[in-house]
Image (spheres, helix red, strand yellow):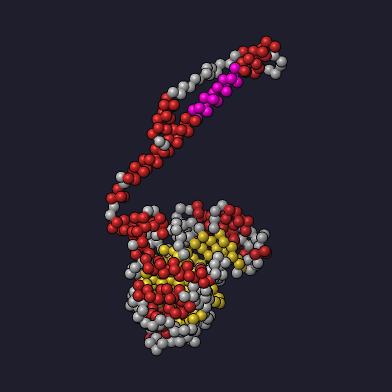
């Protein structure tokens, strides 16, 4: 608002006088008479009432006019105030301490605030660090010259079937974006994540190949066994000297080529390889003594190979193995069961095993000594009886927080023993085999069993008359735990119904109650076996 306009507003407001009529609320005789009955009033009274009504109407019109004048002045004041606030912001900005910050300090602020942010390509202007270059020319210059801001790159491969542009034009633009972001990262170590359609960027490997020696993290999640994956795995040794973590996953595809890239990776600590392969020999060429994470659910391993790997990985914290039969290739360096008494893996906290045959001899794995074990999963393609020999291996630490026994049929006696021995259990999956008994449910309700449990996936049988009250007992346990003060609330539930189709259980006792509980905020998921 200009100075002249502000002056006129102040003068106009000072000259505004508001005349207030007499607002006495005392009722005269006409009002009292009219309120006392509905009979016709004398003509003299009606004449006087019409006169008073006319005066009141004139007074109301005058009041409305004065209110409009005041509202206009108030609107002027509000506008004047907004303009003043804007001017103050401008003047405050002119003397802001931020203007005194050295470029080097702004650089460190940017790095500190964006240290965990990824650069998404194709770009998203509302995300870091793109948005920093849109504030002012100074910030843009600093952000473009701060390689650390551009060193964590998330490449979203464009959909091959999109109709927005022809594949050639689309890839040309996408390629230019990726190239520019990598250029901005300078010589900084790279963390590179590639997600999307495997057909969308067939030449992506050519863009990152010149920078392999800078990559510290490489995460590839693409559909199919992409050419990028094949080219990377077949690289000669020695090209990834700084790689610390690699995750490779995709659709269910098999890779049968050579895997040589990891043979000379001196800093590699984490490997997650989720494609199916026909050989496991390359695993033994990894720097096993430095690994902290090894996830290879698609690599065929014999039990004695697993033992050998665990004996060679003293720093391993998490591992996932696919245990197969005797057809797997066994390197000559792998000891037999007779050579192994116990295997101590001191730091292992998470052990996940998938058994690909019901008759696999895993007695050697049961001799593992795992003093830090917190998470254990055992699953198989076919149901098999739970081997009590696993008990000492998984319970020795006394720290178990997650227990998942998929396809393992555990006897009721063994199940109760497991639950008694795992007081720190937070997550439990026993959706195969047998139901929790009423005795176990009662102990879970009062906190005698698994007092810290918050996630449960279990079986609900519906095969006979004895099962009719099973769901109600489970729901009773859940509600009792929620009200109790010495037990954790089980907030995530999966009930696996066995014995009937979904359409056949509409009248099953407890189902309406479970539906109502979900409406009240519970998270109970129904599944059918």
User: Who's the residue at 42% across and 33% down the image?
Assistant: 5
Relative side of 417 to 104, left or right: right
Which span of residues is magenta-colored? Answer: 55-71
Percent position (x, y) of residue 156? 47, 67
Q: Residue at x 45, y 70 (%)?
A: 175
Q: Is residue 48 left or right of residue 19?
A: right
- Residue closer to the observer: 24 or 38: 24
Q: Quick check: can you spot residue 434?
A: no
Pick the front one: 381 or 500: 381
Q: Is residue 495 visible?
A: yes
- Measured along the vertical axis of the image, is residue 322 above or below residue 126? below
> 81 above or below 282?
above
Among all residues in the image, which is located at the extreme front? 4
The quarter holding residue 243 reads: bottom left
Residue 294 in the image: state x and y as whole percent.
Answer: 41, 75
- Quarter of the image that includes the N terminus: top left
Magenta-drawn stretch contains 63: yes
């Amino acid at each position: 608002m200009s100075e002249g306009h502000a002056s006129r507003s102040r003068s106009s407001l000072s000259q505004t006088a508001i005349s207030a009529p007499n607002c006495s609320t005392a009722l005269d005789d006409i009002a009292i008479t009219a309120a006392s009955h509905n009979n016709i009033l004398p003509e003299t009274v009606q004449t006087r009432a019409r006169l008073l009504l006319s005066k009141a109407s004139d007074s109301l019109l005058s009041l409305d006019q004065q209110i409009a004048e005041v509202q206009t002045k108030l609107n002027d004041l509000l506008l004047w105030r907004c303009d003043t606030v804007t001017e103050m912001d401008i003047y405050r900005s002119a003397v802001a301490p931020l203007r005194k910050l050295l470029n080097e300090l702004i650089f460190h602020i940017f790095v500190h605030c964006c240290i965990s942010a990824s650069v998404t390509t194709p770009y998203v202007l509302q995300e870091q660090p793109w948005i920093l270059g849109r504030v002012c020319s100074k910030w843009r210059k600093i952000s473009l010259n701060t390689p650390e801001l551009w060193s964590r790159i998330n490449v979203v491969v464009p959909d091959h079937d999109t109709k927005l542009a022809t594949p050639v034009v689309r890839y040309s633009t996408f390629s230019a974006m990726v190239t520019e972001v990598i250029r901005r990262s300078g010589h900084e170590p790279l963390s590179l994540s590639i997600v999307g359609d495997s057909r969308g960027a067939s030449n992506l490997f050519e863009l990152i190949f010149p920078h392999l020696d800078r990559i510290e993290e490489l995460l590839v999640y693409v559909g199919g066994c992409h050419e990028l994956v094949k080219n990377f795995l077949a690289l000669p040794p020695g090209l990834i000297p700084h790689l610390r973590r690699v995750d490779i996953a995709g659709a269910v595809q098999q890779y049968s080529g050579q895997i040589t890239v990891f043979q000379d990776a001196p800093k590699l600590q984490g490997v997650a390889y989720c494609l199916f392969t026909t050989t496991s020999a390359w695993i033994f060429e990894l720097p096993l003594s430095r690994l902290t994470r090894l996830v290879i659910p698609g690599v065929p391993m014999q039990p004695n190979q697993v033992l050998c790997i665990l004996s060679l990985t003293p720093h391993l914290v998490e591992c996932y193995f696919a245990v197969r039969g005797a057809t797997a290739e066994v390197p000559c360096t792998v000891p037999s069961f007779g050579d192994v008494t116990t295997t101590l893996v001191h730091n292992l906290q998470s052990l996940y095993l998938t058994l690909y045959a019901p008759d696999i001899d895993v007695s050697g794995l049961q001799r593992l000594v795992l003093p830090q074990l917190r998470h254990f999963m055992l699953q198989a393609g076919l149901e098999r009886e739970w081997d009590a020999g696993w008990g000492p291996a998984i319970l020795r630490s006394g720290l178990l927080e997650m227990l998942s026994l998929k396809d393992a049929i555990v006897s009721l006696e063994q199940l109760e023993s497991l639950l008694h021995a795992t007081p720190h259990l937070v997550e439990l999956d026993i959706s195969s085999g047998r139901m929790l008994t009423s005795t176990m449910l009662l102990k879970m309700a009062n906190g005698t069993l698994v007092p810290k449990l918050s996630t449960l996936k279990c079986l609900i049988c519906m095969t006979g008359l004895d099962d009719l009250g099973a769901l109600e007992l489970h729901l009773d346990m859940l509600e009792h735990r929620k009200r109790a003060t010495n037990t954790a609330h089980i907030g995530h539930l999966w009930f696996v119904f066995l014995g009937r189709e979904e359409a056949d259980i509409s009248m099953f006792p407890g189902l309406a109650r479970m539906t109502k509980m979900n409406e009240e905020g519970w998270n109970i998921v129904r599944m059918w076996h």
